[in-house]
Each structure stands twice: as C-alpha cells, then as structure tokens.
Image (cartoon, grey):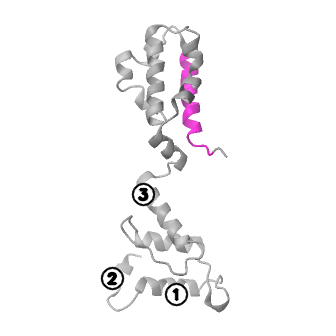
Amino acid sequence: MDSLDKLPTSDRDTAGDIYEYVLSKLSTSGTNGQFRTPRHIIKMMVELMKPTPEDKIIDPAMGSAGFLVEASEYDYEKDFGDTPITKLVRNIVGLDRKAANEAFSEFLSEQRLNLQQAKFVELIIDYVVKNGILDKKVVLQQEPFRTVGSIVEVFKDNKADAKKIISMIDEINKNAEQIIS
C-alpha cells in the first residue's frame, strides 16, 4: 500500500483505476455494468482517501450512499473512537434534571443522609444534569467532589447507601448507551 503514493497521478485517476481493477476481480458486478460495492472495498477506499469534514465527496451513482456513510463513520471514529452515538449525545445535552432527581430521590426524600452526604448526592445530580454521564473513577476524585470528601470518607458510616449511589451512577451511564425506541 505504501507504494501507491509513488504512482504518477498527474494525468489519470489512479485511485479510480485501482478501484475499477479491484471491482473487476469480484463476482459482485451486476448487469449493464452496475455494481454494488462491497462494504470492505468502500471501507478500504475511504481509509485510503482519509476524508476530512472539509472535503467534498462526489459520487454521482451513489445508490445506497455507501461511500458517504463510510466517510461519515470514518470521521466519527477518528474524533470519538468507539464511543456510542447515544453516549456522545447524552454527554453533549446532559441528563434531564427531573430524571436525575428521580434517580436519586430515595437518598434525598427520606432524609436519611447527613448534610455532607446530601451535598455529595446533589453534586452528583448537578454533574449528570450538565454532563449526562459520570466516570466515577475519575470525576469523583476531582472538584467539586474532592472539597466535600471522597465517597469512602463521606459515607464511611453508610456503606450501603454509597453502594446504591454507585449503582445508580452505573445505571445512568449504562442508559446513556442504549437506544430506546
């Protein structure tokens, strides 16, 4: 593949020639010169072209828009890796405050938490409302949580509730990756 960059391209469409050659070796060509481009070929072509959002993709015989879809997926993966789109959207728009309050209602409504513990839960609610998800291994060690204290310190006499709070955070994060129809 490295030698492809060295091919002369001044008077010809080398990438197009390679593409046509590869397709000619496949048994997926249709009648009258029509093709359904196999997914792995589309993926290879997009990876060779390395499109950016500024590039224009012109495919006059686009059929199912395979090249456009693959170029979009390529760009998404480059920027966001394997992050599910639902998690990305949740991270951008956050979580509805009513839903967050309902998720943690048992801790706030029963008044079984002390002031420091209630403040900790309120910080969690504020965080998920703004950010949609919470990476408990990282975020709970940072401000503003650090000022209140670690979850281990804050809930040292109330480990059962600490475990339930962690479970609720896990549930919120899990729900961010699901598509609800």
In whole angstroms, how far apart are the C-alphas of marks 2 and 1? Answer: 18 Å
Q: Please tell me the numbered disc located at residue 49.
A: none
Q: Position of residue 140 (x, y in %)?
A: 42, 26
Relative to 76, residue 88 above or below: above
Residue beneath the point at 57% across and 29% down: 99
Which amino acid, by three-letter code, is at mark 2? Lys
In whole angstroms, how far apart are the C-alphas of marks 3 and 2? Answer: 25 Å
Which amino acid, by three-letter code, is at mark 3? Lys
Q: Earlier in the sequence, mark 1 or mark 3?
A: 1
Residue beneath the point at 40% across and 68% down: 51
Counting other residues with Cα less than 10 Å from the Cα at mark 1, is it few (<14), some (14-19), or many (20 or more)? few
Relative to 26, residue 91 above or below: above
The residue singled out by tag 1 in the image is: 21
Please identify, in this view, whether the residue under mark 3 or under mark 2 is nearer the observer: 3
Quadrant occupied by the N terminus: bottom left
Q: Position of residue 80 (x, y in %)?
A: 44, 51
Q: Earlier in the sequence, mark 2 or mark 1?
A: 2
Counting other residues with Cα less than 10 Å from the Cα at mark 2, is it few (<14), some (14-19), or many (20 or more)? few
Given residues 159 and 88, the one toward you in this image is 88
Given residues 144 and 166, the one toward you in this image is 144
Residue beneath the point at 41% across and 54% down: 79
> Disc 1, disc 3: CB below 8 Å?
no
Which amino acid, by three-letter code, is at mark 1? Tyr
Residue beneath the point at 45% across and 9% down: 115
Residue 177 included in the magenta stretch of the image: yes
The residue singled out by tag 2 in the image is: 6
Q: Position of residue 69 (x, y in %)?
A: 53, 66
The residue singled out by tag 3 in the image is: 78
Q: Earlier in the sequence, mark 3 or mark 2?
A: 2
| Residue range highlighted in magenta | 161-179
**Element type at mark 1:** helix
Relative to 108, residue 102 above or below: below
